[in-house]
Amino acid sequence: MELCIISVACCLFVVILAAVKLYELSIKRPFVSNVKLDGKTVIVTGANTGLGFWTALDLASRGARVILACRNLQKAEDARKKILKELQSNCDVIVRHLDLSSMKSVRQFVRETFEQESRLDILINNAAVSGIPKTITEEGLEYSYATNYIGPFHLTNLLLDLLKNSAPSRIVNLTSVMNTFGHLNCDDLQAKGHYDPFSAYKNTKLMNVLFTKELARRLEGTGVTTSCVHPGLAATDIFRSLRIANIVGPLISLFFKTAKDGAQTTIYCALSEEMQDAKGEYMSDSQVYDKTVWINKDAYDEGLCKKLWETTEAILESIES
Ligand SMILES: NC(=O)c1ccc[n+]([C@@H]2O[C@H](COP(=O)([O-])OP(=O)(O)OC[C@H]3O[C@@H](n4cnc5c(N)ncnc54)[C@H](OP(=O)(O)O)[C@@H]3O)[C@@H](O)[C@H]2O)c1
């Protein structure tokens, strides 16, 4: 009986994965455009692997100066060499250290960026972790919440002057369809009281959406625009912390889209003419996904977006003081 239930569950799982694959194939939309980025500067966080790597490669191939903002310098250097090889050294790609879980590292990264760059045209907040057990950093932040939301919030705000001076410029924030199932508690933003790894991912991905909506309102009239992206289900390392990663990994690479395909909506938001006046749209498959079932209704609560913003500012102030 037990064996029968397990077999049915496995079959169901494979059927769901096959459906995902069919869906991904049916809506596959590579971003085809000859937009050039000569003279432009781009930052991609978490660019050493997965979607970030393919985003960085595409933008570098268009002539941009691309900064790979990564926590592991060795991995970042390897990625840089791969991009140089792919583009036959015909590109300007540099590595700069950034650990988004540490606000000290974020500020150091920004200091170096202001010292070494005269402009910033595109910021891609791509890096994230998932499935990490509760970990409190030296600064008293919870690691997943810091990496996926508080760090990108801090980074973006500190880079705003450079983005404004380079306008028109764009900010693209990676979220996930999992935002739909997230829950926001501004009284315990980092779920220190009641942490679980899966909720941390959903909740931070919801914060990415609310952050984008509020950021868009605050940026009105500055020439800096923003949008957020669910990239679809792509075979990357994002599930590396799952206990069943060894089983899930091979299945994922069979059924999910490739990381290169997964990067297409990000690239679309960064470059397309249609997105030049973006106002915080939630995008997937290079289309607006607002008002679908795949966005949490909290995204439309302007008061909540503002409260999240102010709560995050208060957390950052408490670290600095
Ligand atoms: N893949 C999917 O199916 C999927 C679906 C929905 C949304 N997304 C979103 O897409 C984005 C990219 O994910 P991915 O699938 O490409 O994941 P990935 O392959 O795991 O890449 C994540 C990147 O983030 C970096 N990173 C992690 N913690 C960091 C920190 N503290 N500071 C700086 N960088 C850090 C990683 O660096 P290391 O290599 O050093 O760990 C890596 O470069 C994420 O925001 C994710 O939530 C992905």
Image (tube, rainbow, N blue to C red):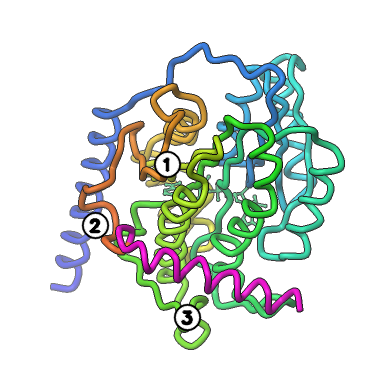
Give me the residue at 64% from left, 45% from top: 45
Q: Residue furthest front?
A: 221
Dot 2 or dot 1, earlier in sequence: 2
Where does the image place residue 236, in percent across and percent down from the top left? 50, 44
Which residue lies under the disc numbered 1? 234
Q: Residue 313 in magenta?
A: yes
Q: Residue furthest right?
A: 115
Label 1: element kind: loop
Label 3: element kind: loop
> Closest to the observer: 57 or 281?
281
- Camera sees residue 133: yes
- Camera sees residue 261: no
Are dots 2 and 1 in contact, CB under 8 Å?
A: no
Where does the image place residue 57, in percent across and percent down from the top left? 62, 27
> Closest to the observer: 63 or 158?
158
| Res 6 quadrant in image | bottom left
Crowd tier of the residue under label 1, counting other residues whose Cα lies within 10 Å: few below 14, some 14–19, many 20 or above:
many
Q: Which mark is residue 144?
A: none
Image depth: mark 2 or mark 3 in front: 3
Q: Residue furthest bottom?
A: 193
Q: Look at the picture and state if 286 lies above or below 181.
A: above
Left or right of residue 115: residue 60: left
Q: Which mark is residue 195?
A: 3
Are dots 3 and 1 in contact, CB under 8 Å?
A: no
Real-space CA distance between mark 2 and mark 1, rounded to the nearest whole angstrom: 21 Å
Label 2: element kind: helix
Where does the image place residue 126, in percent across and percent down from the top left? 56, 46
> Closest to the observer: 43 or 258?
43
Which residue lies under the disc numbered 2? 10
- Looking at mark 1, is its residue's CB closer than 8 Å to ligand 1? yes
User: Over which residues does the magenta segment extend?
Assistant: 299-321
Give me the residue at 53% from left, 49% from top: 237
